[in-house]
């Protein structure tokens, strides 16, 4: 469990920060972890509840650092901050690149292609 003093310190840091949290669309686009990849004793580092306690767990994984959280918990955190609550990695600085090297470009196909 996260000590209360540390929780208070984090909340104060977030309140003092000038930058906003992540956009709702970014939060909603976080990759979900399939139930088959969740171990019996895995838990959310924010609320400390095991994912198994929930009948229908929704677990999100942050890009780059790979830390996993309950979707509800990480949504609240990222609405106020752009960093991972565990390692403080800036999740917005690691935008996923899209490989377009194998994409066929449309060349004047007209309306009916």
Image (tube, rainbow, N blue to C red):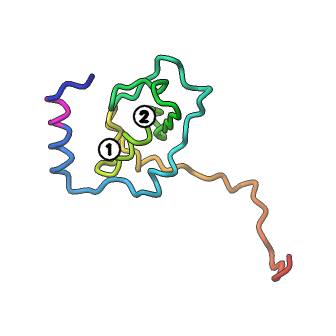
* On-image quarter of the C terminus: bottom right
Pointer 1 residue: 77
Instruction: Label 1: state its secondary structure.
Output: helix
Coordinates of residue 69 in the picture (x, y in percent): 42, 34
Q: Is residue 75 left or right of residue 58?
A: left
Foreground: 43 or 110?
43
Coordinates of residue 51 in the picture (x, y in percent): 46, 27
Q: Looking at the image, is mark 1 or mark 2 earlier in the sequence?
A: 2
Coordinates of residue 11 in the picture (x, y in percent): 19, 42
Range covered by the magenta-colored residues = 5-9
- Asked if residue 57 is positioned above or below residue 98 in the image, the reply reads above
Instruction: Label 2: state its secondary structure.
Output: strand
Q: Is residue 106 left or right of residue 89?
A: right
- Asked if residue 39 is positioned above or below residue 23 in the image, the reply reads above
User: Any mark on residue 69, and which?
Assistant: 2
Foreground: 113 or 35?
35
Spatial CA span between label 1 and label 2:
10 Å
Q: Is residue 3 left or right of residue 40?
A: left
| Residue 59 is one of the magenta-drawn residues | no
Q: Kindly identify the residue that appears in the image at 46 percent across and 21 percent down.
A: 42
Coordinates of residue 96 in the picture (x, y in percent): 54, 49
Predominant secondary structure in magenta? helix
Q: Is residue 21 left or right of residue 55?
A: left
- Asked if residue 57 is positioned above or below residue 23 in the image, the reply reads above
Q: Kindly identify the residue that appears in the image at 43 percent across and 36 percent down.
A: 70
Instruction: Tell me where residue 1 sits by quadrant.
Output: top left
């Amino acid at each position: 469990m996260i000590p209360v003093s540390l929780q208070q310190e984090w909340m104060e840091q977030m309140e003092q920060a000038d930058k906003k949290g992540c956009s709702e669309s970014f939060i909603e686009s976080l990759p979900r972890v399939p139930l088959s990849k969740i171990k019996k004793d895995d838990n959310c580092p924010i609320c400390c509840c095991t994912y198994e306690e929930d009948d229908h767990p929704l677990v999100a994984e942050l890009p780059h650092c790979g830390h996993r959280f309950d979707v509800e918990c990480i949504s609240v955190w990222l609405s106020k901050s752009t960093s991972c609550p565990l390692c403080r990695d800036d999740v917005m600085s690691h935008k996923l690149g899209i490989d377009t090297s194998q994409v066929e470009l449309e060349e004047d196909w007209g309306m009916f292609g």
